[in-house]
Image: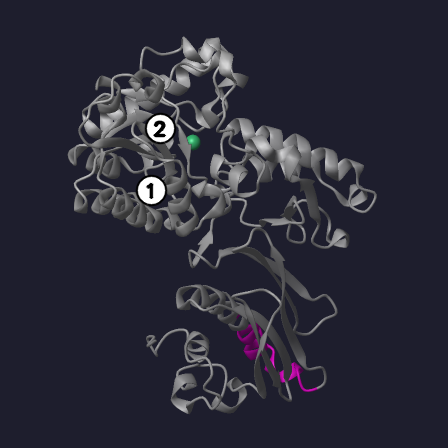
């Protein structure tokens, strides 16, 4: 709960939420504001209709300025720090300007408004959109905005590039979509600068940080003057999620329910699963199950799962995405070091059924290369994203193609108990269980699942071991 007192005094102010009287020394270091001026006249925390989110309201009513600030507060302190850091930096900009223009402010006090909107995205995720408006002399106020996408279950903010796959192809598509929207908008068209949008989309530093999700659409918010003349204000372009679906990461297509993973594959195209191979050759010994983890490696959750597997002497198979291996080679190496099986799950989780032969080949090859580079081992099995198979996919690699027999739906429920129940209700000797090592709820689930399987006298082995039996 303790913060460094020398820095970010406002941050401290919120760090001790609930304490109404703030000590004078907290604000003593500020060069601009006197102690009296920094203490809000009122500071209220109110509940919202959104679970896990409350609102802090701070009012400062002074001779030279008026400030009204609203910002969300969460159970998690690191999230609160991010909000406060932003609020205090906005305040600082304002106070610096107030200090500069102090002598003019007796007649017309300056004002600062920090407001925010909150839009639920999924059960645990909210788009928090700040709007800051300040007037310090002069009629034209300054406006700015800031977006936080907050996961109150994971206690983390989500970067926009975790949602949107940022590559050249997608930027081009996005440019076309945004261009259409601007040109069709009566409101913005007269003020719109096409070249500025082009510059914006081509800017390497563009992290789409003003993008957020609202009402089943992705909203691109532009600060004043970025792609339009001042008269257009801060334009917001809203594009339905369905139109942008293919630009989103697999995880987010799933989280936004844009894709239903079909656990019952079309029979004609489905190669025999390990389970079917196994039928008739069951040994009288221990029952066996292959746990499989897709879409990783994840910098935290995969490591936690590795610990749990070790604890229970269990082996598993990790179907990794090439681009994530590229990001986290150390974790891929750890998976390999601990004796688990390495699986290829393509480079960035495209539906291979929509690609041509050359593209499919590239998806698989690049991933095998990344795995080899990270682990000094070859992947030994392949699983296509979404279990999407046609003859072309089937023939694209010599690696054995592996689907699953038990879909835990962990990506959807994000609930360890529910995942455990899926396993309990469906697991049998020879099952291949599908999970995703990128979710924290799955980490909890793995703990429960491993305990259950151990109690039921199951042995956890890799997919290939299951095949050989
Ligand atoms: Zn996947």
User: Which residues lie in the magenta part?
Assistant: 93-106
Is 428 left or right of 253, judged from the image as shown? left
Q: Residue at x 76, y 51 (%)?
A: 232
Q: Is residue 209 above or below residue 178?
A: below
Q: Is mark 2 within 8 Å of ligand 1?
A: no
Q: Residue at x 36, y 21 (%)?
A: 402
Q: Is residue 369 above or below residue 142?
A: above
Q: Residue at x 22, y 23 (%)?
A: 465
Disc 1 target residue: 298
x, y (%) of residue 466? 25, 23
x, y (%) of residue 434? 38, 34
x, y (%) of residue 425? 40, 40
Does any portion of residue 205 appear in the rendered image?
no
x, y (%) of residue 463? 27, 25
Report the front residue among 192 and 427.
427
Q: Is residue 311 above or below residue 36?
A: above
Residue sitting at the far right: 186
Task: Give the image quarter of residue 431.
Answer: top left
């Amino acid at each position: 709960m303790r913060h460094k007192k020398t820095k970010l005094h406002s941050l401290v102010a919120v760090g001790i939420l609930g304490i109404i009287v703030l000590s004078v020394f907290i604000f003593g270091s500020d060069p601009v504001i006197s102690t009296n001026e920094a203490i809000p006249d009122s500071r209220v925390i109110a509940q919202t209709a959104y679970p896990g989110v409350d609102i802090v309201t701070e009012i400062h009513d002074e001779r030279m300025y008026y400030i009204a600030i609203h910002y969300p507060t969460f159970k998690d302190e690191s999230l609160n720090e991010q909000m406060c850091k932003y609020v205090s930096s906005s305040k600082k900009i304002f106070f610096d300007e107030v200090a500069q223009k102090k002598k003019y402010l007796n007649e017309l006090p300056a004002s600062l408004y920090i407001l925010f909107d909150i839009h639920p995205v999924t059960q645990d995720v909210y788009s928090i959109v700040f709007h800051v408006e300040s007037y310090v002399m002069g009629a034209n106020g300054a406006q700015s905005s800031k977006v936080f996408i907050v996961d109150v279950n994971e206690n983390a903010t989500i970067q926009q590039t975790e949602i949107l796959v940022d590559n050249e192809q997608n930027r081009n598509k996005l440019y076309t979509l945004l261009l259409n929207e601007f040109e069709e908008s009566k409101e913005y068209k007269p003020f719109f600068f096409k070249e500025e949008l082009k510059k914006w989309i081509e800017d390497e530093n563009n992290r789409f940080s003003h993008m957020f999700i609202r009402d089943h659409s992705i909203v691109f918010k532009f600060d004043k003057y970025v792609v339009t003349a001042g008269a257009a204000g801060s334009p917001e372009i809203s594009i339905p999620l369905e139109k942008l679906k293919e630009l989103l990461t697999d995880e987010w297509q799933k989280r936004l329910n844009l894709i239903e993973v079909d656990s019952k594959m079309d029979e004609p195209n489905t190669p025999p699963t390990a389970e079917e191979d196994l039928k008739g050759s069951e040994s009288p010994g221990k029952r066996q199950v292959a746990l499989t983890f897709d879409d990783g490696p994840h910098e935290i959750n995969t490591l936690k799962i590795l610990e749990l597997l070790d604890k229970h002497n269990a082996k598993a198979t990790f179907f990794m995405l090439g681009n994530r291996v590229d990001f986290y080679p150390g974790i891929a190496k750890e998976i390999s070091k601990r004796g688990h099986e390495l699986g290829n799950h393509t480079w960035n989780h495209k539906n291979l059924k929509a690609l041509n032969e050359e593209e499919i080949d590239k998806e698989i090859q690049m991933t095998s290369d990344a795995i080899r580079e990270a682990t000094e081992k070859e992947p030994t099995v392949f699983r296509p994203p979404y279990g999407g198979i046609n003859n072309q996919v089937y023939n694209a690699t010599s690696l054995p193609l592996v689907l699953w027999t038990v879909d835990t739906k962990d990506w959807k429920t994000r609930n360890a108990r529910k995942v455990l129940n899926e396993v309990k209700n469906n697991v049998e000797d020879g099952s291949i269980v599908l999970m995703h090592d990128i979710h924290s709820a799955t980490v909890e689930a793995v703990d429960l699942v491993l305990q259950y399987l151990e109690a039921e006298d199951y042995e956890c082995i890799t997919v290939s071991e299951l095949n050989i039996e």
